[in-house]
Amino acid sequence: NAGVTQTPKFQVLKTGQSMTLQCAQDMNHEYMSWYRQDPGMGLRLIHYSVGAGITDQGEVPNGYNVSRSTTEDFPLRLLLAAPSQTSVYFCASSDRQGHEQYFGPGTRLTVT
Amino acid sequence: EDKVVQSPLSLVVHEGDTVTLNCSYEVTNFRSLLWYKQEKKAPTFLFMLTSSGIEKKSGRLSSILDKKELFSILNITATQTGDSAVYLCAVEAGSNSGYALNFGKGTSLLVTP
């Protein structure tokens, strides 16, 4: 199993550009989530999904969209990138809520 | 608003010392508390606690939860330089459409030779 994979590993965007961060897992996990990690702020939940077709907002959803058309994939879209979105983004999955989450390797995003 | 507070924020110890990391929480509909270790990359899972008073142990690491006083501790005995990392506490709590993980800011531990 590859576990949780994320692409790209690094990305630089200009303000106002859009992009999609990809996340995939091959463990048939129902629960997937996106976090951002900023210095001194810990991990903050952006969006999460409890299964295909179901998504919900976390603590810091503004500026981000998600969809979950398949169990395996959970892409995160930035529609109009802003410097405040400069961060490290982690995707995670678990077989159900309340269980250990497996994290992807992260995407380091810089918005100039 | 759900809150998870870790203390101390950072700690420097010598190899062989024992350390105790703290995590207190105020959340709605508590479900579980998890500890993760983060070195330079993604967090890796250490423990999940759901019941009060039951210690989880793995080698030199152990953790216990007190649901009445709303806190957990993570103990590391006989520390080694490889224990240097950020230790994250996360609490799974209920929301309108399910449960979400709320992370604390982490405790940065440095173990010196």
Image: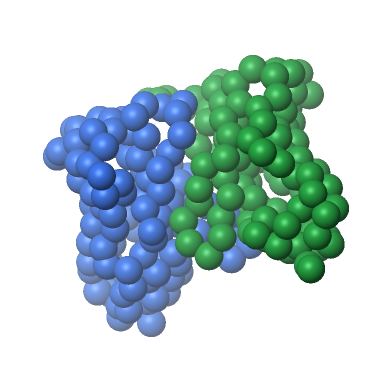
| Residue A32 image point, x, y percent | 33, 39
Side (left or right) of B59 relative to A107? right
**Image quadrant in which the N terminus of chain B is located:** top right
Q: How is the image coloured?
A: by chain
User: What residue is rendered at 34% in x and 29% in y?
Assistant: A95
Q: Quadrant of residue B98?
A: top left
Say which quarter of the image contains residue B64. Answer: top right
Q: Quadrant of the C terminus of chain B?
A: bottom right
Q: Residue at x 80, y 60 (%)?
A: B15
Which colour represents chain A? Answer: blue
Asked whether, in this view, residue A16 is left or right of residue B94, the answer is left
- Who's the residue at 70% across and 33% down the image? B63
Residue B13 versus residue A77: which sits nearer the camera? Answer: B13
* Closer to the camera in the image, B77 or B8: B77
Decide if residue A46 is on the left or right side of residue B103: left
Q: Looking at the image, can residue B108 be seen?
A: no
- Image coordinates of residue A16 in percent, x first then y, are 28, 74
Q: Nearer the viewer, residue A60 or B60?
A: B60
Provide the letter of the chain coloured green.
B
Question: Is B19 left, or right, of B91 in this rendering?
Answer: right
**Residue sitting at x 83%, y 47%:** B18
- Relative height, residue B76 to residue B63 (above, below): below
Measured from the top left, where is residue A94 in percent x and y? 37, 34
Would residue A3 be seen by someone viewing this image from the given angle?
Answer: yes
User: Going by the picture, which residue comes out furthest to the left?
Assistant: A69
Is B93 drawn above or below residue B86 in the view shown?
above
Name the spot of residue B85 as percent of width and height, x first: 64, 59
